[in-house]
Image (tube, rainbow, N blue to C red):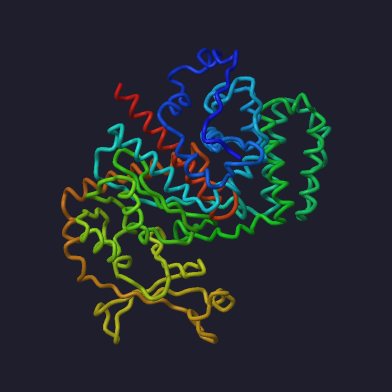
């Protein structure tokens, strides 16, 4: 059970916090900035309030997740650092001598307490509320884009994945003691995954007998990552079975296996809305959702800036109806309107992707009735070998057909107002500010590990997205507040 009152711990060592956690420390500033009681209010229904063992405060458990994201640590390393890092204990509202949780508690918290909870919208909405209260968000402009996150598994073959993790461990060890080469098991040179798995088990067993080396944080972090990877492999038996991840395409020649996060950001670089989908989804379909979510969070909006993916006819009509200026350059294919089949246009590759995630292999411009340039359309041709065995071929591919094509009419006479707008100097000037969201995507990936999913499944990706964006927004708010001083 949980109590709606935080327990006040009187510690003779509490004064240590004033000595080692300065007022300008980021974790102290976050504690002062955010009233985390909203987490208790949202999660109290997941606990019993009347009987049972006293549960760890959901606020503290949530703060553990934030620390994990701020410092990009594994569960094991997070808890280990929480034992001795007083800034962590201060942030967690613990006394310096308090015991920390077991790492397995974090897994249970994510799976049992955060299920069926719209954590993504809740956390983004909270940061937008704080930014508005502090007078940080003053603009009424949204910048929209999507960024991709590779699935944790299936980026490499299972054997390549395990070899990479074991190599990282060996490299960290050799920097301290090259003589360990004599103690390590002989590396696996076969192509058998089970042999590589056995090698990893032997490597782990060898290092566990070397407490002096394992005491070094650089080694222990790599060791824990390898151990988690081996345990996950043993449980799932494959690194290619993420149930929700899908193939998406960045260009005609490059693809990824994973997820997409569709983002809306204010001109002050505060993320105001997000939608997380599987990797094959197109960007433009989520513009209306991003705008509505941003409005619900408290944003006033009179302008949206995005790339050509957002220039669909429906988006133009929606923004016009809602008196929002759409700074998105027209694309002759994206702008052709609603289509019957769920084919998605990939604006980076300039090709369509079928519902199964396969990209067209080529395209051809052609006219109708033998008259070139009259009512022109584009023919997108797909790999017939993939269509013949595709599990989603019903209603899409006719059995026995020698080709599979998808036609799109080009309606070049439409969108005259939008076309005229994009030729103006204000449009061209505003379009240049789109770089801000590309920089934000880079920050999410390079500083907070958003390049790769930390777990499997869309639910896990949503938790990762929610906590990452929450941390990034808080950092931005603190930076802007400090600049005002």
Q: Residue at x 57, y 41 (%)?
A: 49
> Is 269 left, or right, of 203 in this rendering?
left
Residue 94 lies, with reference to residue 290, above or below; the image says: above
In the rendered image, residue 44, in percent from the top left (x then y), is placed at 52, 43
Residue 275 lies, with reference to residue 401, above or below; the image says: above
> Is 169 left, or right, of 301 in this rendering?
right
Q: Residue at x 52, y 32 (%)?
A: 5
In the rendered image, residue 378, in percent from the top left (x then y), is placed at 35, 74
Query: Which quadrant does the N terminus fall into?
Result: top right
Residue closest to the eye, 120 or 154: 120
Q: Residue at x 69, y 27 (%)?
A: 175
Query: Which quadrant does the C terminus fall into?
Result: top left
Residue closest to the eye, 406 or 64: 64
In the rendered image, residue 13, in percent from the top left (x then y), is placed at 59, 14
Q: Residue at x 47, y 57 (%)?
A: 277
In the rendered image, residue 405, in percent from the top left (x then y), is placed at 43, 78
> Is 247 left, or right, of 126 in this rendering?
right
Q: Quadrant of residue 344?
A: bottom left
> Is 386 left, or right, of 310 in this rendering?
right
């Amino acid at each position: 059970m949980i109590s709606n009152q935080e327990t006040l711990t009187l510690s003779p060592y509490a004064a240590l916090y004033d000595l080692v956690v300065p007022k300008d420390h980021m974790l102290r500033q976050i504690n002062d900035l955010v009233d985390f009681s909203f987490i208790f209010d949202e999660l109290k229904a997941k606990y019993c309030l009347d009987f049972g063992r006293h549960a760890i405060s959901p606020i503290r458990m949530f703060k553990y997740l934030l620390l994990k994201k701020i410092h990009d640590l594994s569960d094991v390393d997070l808890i280990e650092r929480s034992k001795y890092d007083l800034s962590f204990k201060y942030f967690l509202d613990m006394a310096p001598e308090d015991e920390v949780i077991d790492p397995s508690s974090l897994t249970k918290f994510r799976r049992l307490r955060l299920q069926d909870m719209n954590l993504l919208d809740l956390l983004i909405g909270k940061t937008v509320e704080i930014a508005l209260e502090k007078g940080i968000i003053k603009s009424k402009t949204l910048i929209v884009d999507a960024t991709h996150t590779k699935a944790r598994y299936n980026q490499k073959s299972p054997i390549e994945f395990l070899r990479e993790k074991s190599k990282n461990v060996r490299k960290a060890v050799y920097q301290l003691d090259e003589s360990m080469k004599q103690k390590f098991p002989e590396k696996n040179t076969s192509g058998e995954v089970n042999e590589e798995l056995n090698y990893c088990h032997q490597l782990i067993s060898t290092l566990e007998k070397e407490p002096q080396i394992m005491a070094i944080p650089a080694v222990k972090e790599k060791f824990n990552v390898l151990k988690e990877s081996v345990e996950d492999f043993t449980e799932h038996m494959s690194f290619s079975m993420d149930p929700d991840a899908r193939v998406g395409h960045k260009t005609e020649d490059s693809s990824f296996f994973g997820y997409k996060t569709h983002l809306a950001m204010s001109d002050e670089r505060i993320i105001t809305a997000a939608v997380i989908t599987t990797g094959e989804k197109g960007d433009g379909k989520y513009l209306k959702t991003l705008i509505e979510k941003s409005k619900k969070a408290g944003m006033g909006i009179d302008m949206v800036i995005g790339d050509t993916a957002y220039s669909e006819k429906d988006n133009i009509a929606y923004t016009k109806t809602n008196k929002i200026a759409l700074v998105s350059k027209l694309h002759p294919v994206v702008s052709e309107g609603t289509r019957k089949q769920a084919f998605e246009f990939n604006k980076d590759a300039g090709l369509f992707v079928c519902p199964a995630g396969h990209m067209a292999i080529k395209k051809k411009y052609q006219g109708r009735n033998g008259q070139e340039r009259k009512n022109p359309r584009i023919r997108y041709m797909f790999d017939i070998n993939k269509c013949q065995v595709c599990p989603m071929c019903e209603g899409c591919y006719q059995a026995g057909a020698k080709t599979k094509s998808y036609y799109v009419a080009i309606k070049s006479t439409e969108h005259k107002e939008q076309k005229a707008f994009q030729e103006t100097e204000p449009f061209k000037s505003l379009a240049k500010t789109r770089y801000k969201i590309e920089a934000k995507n880079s920050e999410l990936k390079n500083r907070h590990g958003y390049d790769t999913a930390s777990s499997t499944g869309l639910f896990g990706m949503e938790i990762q997205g929610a906590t990452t964006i929450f941390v990034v927004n808080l950092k931005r708010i603190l930076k802007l507040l400090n600049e005002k001083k």
